Amino acid sequence: MKEIESTAMEIDDSSKSELDDDKRLALILLKEKLAAQNNAKKSELEKLNESIPDLKYQINAAHAKVEKIEESMSTMERLNPLERTEKYHKAIQQEETLEQRLAESQDKVKSLEEDIEEINEDIENTVATLEGKDVDQSWFSSFKKQISEMTDAARIANIKKSLDGLIDTMLTLIALFLFKTLIMPLIFLALFLKGFKYIWNIDPRDWIKQEYSNIKRSE
């Protein structure tokens, strides 16, 4: 019962106050989340950087193809765009598409590099906060909601852990209660019946039935 009361007080305290342990766990979870985001963006950046040389090679090949077609064009085709062949238009379109893909990839690379730099700063601030160092309040304010959500999650996890232990205790108490109020009396009754029969060589149940019959007859 003391354990139950202690658990109840612990849960009540957890719901009323902000625990340092919960905040620390929330910051650790935040650091792990940021690290996972950082790794994902680094992986994406690496793939993009690997694809850019191939895109440049394809652009050079497409440009060479366009120049080759232009060299074989007649004067009329050069002067009048309507006279140009479908093959030439497709080559131009392919070159433009590749150049657009390259521009988008380069923009994405720049964006990922900025994101990675920002996440690294967030990780550094998280580690500094865990170590008790002062951090920029604007950063802490921007992550206040996430830290609060993770703190609540950590608090709920601690409460759940306490409740799991409490359930085991309650089950033990229920088992002891049943043993004391139901099983033990039945055991003592069985022992009494056996002892009564052994000492007086009479089955108490038969004796009770006989006495009950005598009472009925006397009435």
Image (tube, grey):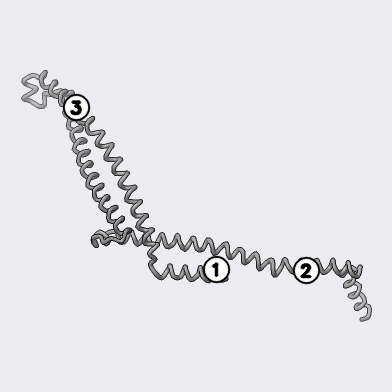
Asked whether the beta carbons under mark 3 and mark 2 sit within 8 Å of each other, the answer is no
Residue at (7% x, 23% y) in the render:
78
Q: Position of residue 109 (x, y in %)?
A: 22, 41
**Is label 3 in a helix, a strand or a loop?**
helix
- Which residue is at the far bottom? 219
Quadrant of the snapshot with the N terminus = bottom right
Q: Residue flagged by tag 3: what amino acid is it?
A: Lys
In front: label 3 or label 2: 2
Q: As displayed, is residue 74 above or below residue 43?
A: above
Q: Residue at x 67, y 67 (%)?
A: 178
Tag count: 3
User: For mark 1, what is the residue?
Assistant: 3
Q: Say left or right for 31 vs 4.
A: left
Q: Position of residue 173 (x, y in %)?
A: 62, 67
In the depicted view, which residue is nearer to us: 194 or 44? 194
Residue 195 % position (x, y): 85, 68
Circle 3 residues within 10 Å: few <14, some 14–19, many ≥20:
few
The mark that comes first in sequence, 1 or 3, is 1
Q: What whole-number distance in Å separates the C-alpha atoms at marks 3 and 2?
A: 100 Å
146 left or right, relative to 79: right
Q: Could you give the CA–CA distance between mark 1 and mark 2, rounded to whole angstroms?
A: 31 Å
Marks 1 and 3 sit apart, C-alpha to C-alpha, by 80 Å
Tell me the quarter of the image containing the C terminus.
Answer: bottom right
According to the picture, the residue beneath numbered tag 3 turns out to be: 90
